Every structure is written in C-alpha cells, then in structure tokens.
Amino acid sequence: MMSALPHPIILVDREGFVAAANDMAQIFFQSSASVLSRQSLSDLLPFGSPVLALVDQARVRLAPVNEYRIDISNPRIGADKVVDVYAAPVPDRTGSVSVMLQERSIADKMDRQLTHRDSARSVTGLAAMLGHEVKNPLSGIRGAAQLLESSVSDEDRALTQLITQETDRIVRLIDRMEIFSDQRPVEREGVNIHVVLDRVKQLAKAEFGDRVRIVEQYDPSLPSVFANQDQLVQVFLNLVKNASEAIIDVPDPEIVLTTAFRPGIRIQVPGSTEKTSLPLEICVKDNGAGIPKELEDCLFDPFVTSKTNGSGLGLALVAKLIGDHGGVIEFDGSGRQTIFRVMLPTSSSEQL
C-alpha cells in the first residue's frame, strides 16, 4: 500500500532506524530497502536536521505533526532538496513513526499551475471590453485612412497604408484575445490522445517539413481522455510549434512527444468541492536553449513572451484550455530538455 503512494514514505522504529521504505523513498534516497533498513534516520539527513525533532514530537505527542520547506540537501541525495514533512505515529507499532516527504519543487509547480489558470482567465474581462470598446473606433480609423489614401500624394500614401496595416494588426490581436472571454462549457467526450498527437504531428510536418525530428514515446494502453478533440489539437499544436521555434538554431533539432499513466495526481478544480484525478501525462520536450529564467514564474501569463514578434497569448490560451478541461500544465526547464507537461483526467475519472 505504501508503494502505491507517489511520495517518499519511510517507517522509523522506536530506535530511530528505518523499518520500511516505499518505492519512492528508495528512489529519493538512492538506496534499496535492504540498505535503508540498516541505517538510522539521522544517517540519511544532514546533521541536526529539523526532521529528527519532528519525528520525536510525533512519537511523544502521539499525534501527527507537519513542517514545511525543510532543506535536507546533502551529498547523498543531492542539492536543492527542500521538502514538506508529515510525521505521524503508527497506532499498532509503539514508538514507530511514519514520515512522508513531499518535494517542494513539485508542490510549487502545482501551485504555479493553478495560478496560471487564474492568470489566463483574468484576461477575460479585458478581452470583452476591447472587443466592444476598441473595435468600433478602429473600423472608423481604418475607413478614414482608406479615404485619405485616394487623395494624398504618393509620399503620404505610404503613411495611410501604414495606418491601415497597423489597424488590421490590432484587430487580429483583439480577435485572439476574445477567445478568452468564451465561458461556454466545453463539449467533451472520450478521446484517444494518440489520435490527437498524430494529427498534431501531421500538421507540424506540413509547416516545417523535415527540418525537425519528431520522436514518439507512447504508452499504447492509455485510457481515453475526457476532452474536446479540436481544442486538444490546438493545445498541442501550439506547444509543438513553440518547441520548433525554440530549436531553430540547434544542430540536431528534436521534439519528443511522450504519453504515460501517472496515478496519484489529484487537484480540486474551480466550481467543484471534490478533487479530480489527473493520471494522463502528455509531454512535449525539445532540446533547445530553454526558457529565460526570469520568465519561468510567469510563463503562462498573458502578454509574456521571449519572442521578438510574439503576442504572448499562445501559452496563456493553452493554460486556459487545459484549465477548462480540469487539467494542469506545468513547465520544467531544470534538465537538458525543455519540457511542457500536461496532466488530464481520463474519461472514466471525470464521470466518477
């Protein structure tokens, strides 16, 4: 049962030694269960770690105790290991305490993604206002520029054409923003995610041909996702297009599409009091230079972009569409690859 949980969990006996460890704990501490069972908790943590005091408190009080953002970095498990710790006495084993560690980086990512969802929706009111208050005056400006064009000199005609072109550009931007004001429920059904990704790959190949290699790493046994197929195509085509632009100068440009089943991710979606399981994980990875560090925390906010001619609405729209599906999108640029990870409900989990 412990091994089914997605976080490292160890059982510490009354003497402070590790009595049991689930699979995630073995991965976290980079040791097998048999090796861990020969060590005390103090051997695994930095000298004087607050985790040791927390375990003692749970043992003495006979009640669960929590503490957040504890740094347990050491040469054994690596740097930047900040965790939330949950310690609780084990009723049927006197003096034993179960300790669960939740890596703070994962929790922070989940918090950020829920914030991104709200950020994408925050542009809704602005889009509705612009569509109503700005488009009409723009039509008048464009019409006036066209009338002037027929009565001015060739030198001034270039200026009237510039007014017309820039007016059209603003209208196109507003049209894109108006998508955010669409609050209608998403029409969903069971969708094969691999059919969606195959369609995305076809469209991507038609756009940039053989310049980029697209690699597929799929789990063929995945259940259907509860989604709108057209909107998912829009989401993943946007992510693949961004990835292709990020690797334009890479000697061997490559995009990797992966699918997997990851049980254990549950969140509470807006408008519901219950948590929804998000076991379907779809990743878009590229081997580009990555996202600038200063943009990572606001990457899915509207009008945030590192592109010279970008509007900054593409990823904001992706975040909105995934949020409308009750899912989560997260970004990981810590390794050698840039990864956009989308987690979605299955058709069955959405209906439970």
Image: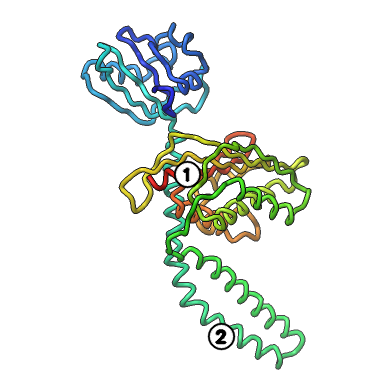
State which quarter of the image contains the C terminus.
top left
Judge whether 337 appears above or below 137 on screen. Answer: above
Q: Is residue 101 above or below residue 319?
A: above
* Residue 223 position in % (x across, y down): 52, 41
Three-letter amino acid code at disc 2? Gly
- Could you classify mark 1 by the number of other residues whose Cα lies within 10 Å: few (under 14), some (14-19), or many (20 or more)? many
Q: Residue at x 66, y 48 (%)?
A: 198
Up-down relation of residue 38 to residue 210 (above or below)? above
Residue that carries the numbered disc 1 in the rendered image: 346
Q: Are marks 1 and 2 in contact (CB under 8 Å)?
A: no
Nearest to viewer (mark 1 / mark 2): 1
Return the x and y of residue 267 as percentages of the image width and height. Answer: 39, 42
Residue sitting at x 42%, y 61%? 185
Q: Foreground residue, 256 or 185?
A: 185
Q: Is residue 232 left or right of residue 148?
A: left
Tell me the quarter of the picture where residue 310 sits: bottom right
Residue at the (38%, 18%) spot, across then down: 49
Judge the density around disc 2: few (<14), some (14-19), many (≥20) Cα neighbours within 10 Å: few
Quadrant of the snapshot with the N terminus = top left
Question: Which residue is label 2 attached to?
Answer: 140
What is the count of numbered marks? 2
* Local SS, label 1: loop
Residue, x 60% and y 34% (percent of image)? 335
Give, as a three-letter code, the residue at label 1: Thr
The answer to which of marks 1 and 2 sits earlier in the sequence is: 2
Q: Position of residue 312 (x, y in %)?
A: 57, 58
Q: 262 or 126: nearer the eye?
A: 262
Horizontal side of residue 272 vs 38, given as left or right: left
Q: Is residue 14 left or right of residue 127?
A: left
Q: In the figure, residue 93 lies in which quadrant? A: top left
